Amino acid sequence: MKKNWVLSQESFDALLQWLAPDREQAGQKYEEIRQRLIRIFTARGCHEPEDLADETINRAADKAGSISEDYVGDPALYFYAVANNIHLEYLRRKPAPTPPIKLDESNHTEEEFHCLEQCLSGLAPESRDLVVRYYQDEKKAKINQRKLLARNLGIGPNALRIRACRIRASLQKCVEKCLGQHFV
Amino acid sequence: MKSVNGNRNNEDLRRYLLGTLPKLLQDQVEQRLMTDAVFNDELVATEDDLIDQYLSQQLSDQERRQFEAHFAITAERQGKIRFGRIFRSYLDSLPAADYRARVGGHSSDRFAVFGAWSGRIPVLVTALVIALFAGTLAAWFVYQRQNRVEGQPVVITLVPGSLRSLEATSQRLKQPPPNTTVQIQLKLTANEYRTYQVELFSENRLVRTVKSLQAQNTDGDLILKFAVESDILNAGDYQCKLSGISDSGQVEFKDSYGFRVNP
């Protein structure tokens, strides 16, 4: 893989211009594309998904100025095509297989529970109620609970699922911040 | 994209995350991930589901191996797993819903009684008991199924009033069958808030809070509707405490609605 691709200011500007005429929107789109590339490289089992995503963006940005005018379709798909090349190069380097991970099953500390409770109490009451009720219970009781929640909120099951997932993600961030470290 | 639409989404995303989706479908999923924000949200939600299923031992052996060898390899996902474990422990520490304990208790009692008798009576009688039991069970399942499929939810409409006035009102409900839904409708005297919350009490014990309710105009009446499982409604007196949520987020008490569940 050609290493040390450097993203010049000119390339970066051309990239943003290609993604959206408004610079703020373009910045958002850029971040979305980066996150999606990271997810894809992660799902393919790559060890360094962030590095590969950045490499993809740098390489796509390098071409942005010359292809943007004639390119038809969503630019995100061009990034995807570049990502496939980057992934092939990654595989050619024959990265060492990752050994199966022994997941941490240690008991939780008082501090972790304290942080979780603190973060839960910092949520809006509706969000707190939703995230607890959505993930509580098992099997049939859980299914019934979710149906009721969706009905009471007037939304579909998929919208409820995504809403609960977002609250859970914000809760995780809050707990990590509270603990002053990442759970790794 | 046909192959990853509808109900197949979840299964395809699960297999994608576990690394078992065929290459062709994998490409389709990834192209959609690059361009579809909602599909991305679904992927993240599927990650959470997989983590919860892993932590609650609900994955098959094969899925479990794939999860550990393929899914859980990045720091980000290990962080999610660790958080999932903490969150799950917290949820498990909360009091279980009353209805779950009751349903579980009934079912195990029934089998315990059967087990105690079965070792003491002759084979022929045992066979007869089994046949009767199976018949009863089948009838019970049919009844439950009909209730679920055909049965309309039980609906009760309440007007403001304290429990003391119950004797003079018709705000009574016959105990609904198990595994059904009871729709409670509260009549409002005025719609002063954009959203409301209702707290349902049984003998001064809070059994349910329902939030973000909005008033609806039904046949000229202002109504707030919400649903609860029949299993939380035992015979006894109940009170719905209605509060409005002000624009500043303050919870402001409005009215009480009493009703009685008769056996």
Image: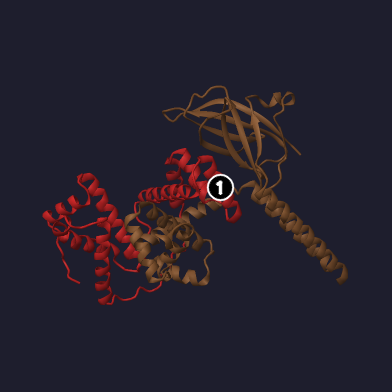
Chain colours: A red, B brown
Q: Residue at x 26, y 56 (%)?
A: A73
Which residue type does callout 1 highlight?
Answer: Lys
Q: Position of residue A155 (x, y in %)?
A: 49, 43
Q: Position of residue B132 (x, y in %)?
A: 82, 61
Number of on-image labels? 1
Q: Nearer the viewer, residue B256 or B194?
A: B194
Q: Quadrant of residue B78?
A: bottom left
User: The N terminus of chain A is located in which quarter?
Assistant: bottom left
Q: Quadrant of residue B162?
A: top right
Q: Is residue B49 above or below residue B59?
A: above
Would residue A158 appear left or right of A75 to someone viewing this image? right
User: The C terminus of chain A is located in which quarter?
Assistant: bottom left
**Mark 1, other Cα within 10 Å: few <14 / some 14–19 / many ≥20:** some
Q: Is residue B205 visible?
A: no
Residue picked out by circle 1: A147
Q: Residue at x 34, y 51 (%)?
A: A180
Q: Is residue B101 visible?
A: yes
Would residue B24 appear left or right of A79 to someone viewing this image? right
Q: Position of residue B221 (x, y in %)?
A: 58, 25
Label 1: which secondary element: helix
Q: Nearer the viewer, residue B161 or B227?
A: B227
Q: Position of residue A138 (x, y in %)?
A: 57, 55
Q: Quadrant of residue B107?
A: bottom right
Q: Chain ID for label 1? A: A
